[in-house]
Image: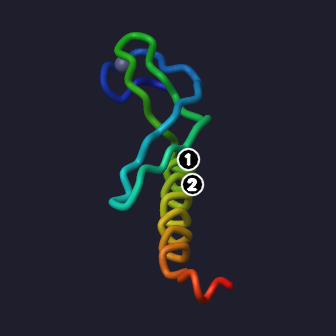
Amino acid sequence: MKCMKCGETAFKSVTSEAIELGFGLLVIRNIPCYKCETCDEIFYTGDVVERIEAIVSEAKRLMQKIRVIEYDEAA
Ligand SMILES: [Zn+2]
């Protein structure tokens, strides 16, 4: 895999991503990625990007669900 920024060889690695959702911060750990050893650029393959997007939309859905639970209704 070539680095999209400088063209040097990028190696398989794992990283963490912090995503601001508006109502809170979502942190995804151990995301498989490629990391360039020359310029430290990190990039993801297409299926990893799709997986991250799915996790983000699921987190938004769950947070919205939690927000509508009223104390009286939950009892
Ligand atoms: Zn690079």
Q: Position of residue 58 (x, y in %)?
A: 55, 66
Q: 75 or 68, which lies in front?
A: 75
Please provide percent x and percent y for residue 41. 38, 24
Residue at 59% of width from left, 25% of height from top? 12
Q: Which residue is mark 1?
A: 48
Above or below, 31 against 59 in this view is above
Task: Look at the numbered discs 2 and 1 and tell me whether their residues touch, using CB distance below 8 Å.
Answer: yes
- Relative placement, left or right, of 70 versus 40 is right
- For residue 68, the mark is none
Q: Residue furthest right?
A: 75
Pinpoint residue 48: horizontal percent, then vertical percent: 55, 47
Residue visible at 45% across and 24% down?
A: 2
Q: Residue at x 41, y 48 (%)?
A: 19
Which of the numbered marks, if any, corresponds to residue 51? 2
Does 18 sit above or below residue 54?
A: above
Q: Residues within 10 Å of mark 1 (few under 14, many from 20)?
A: some
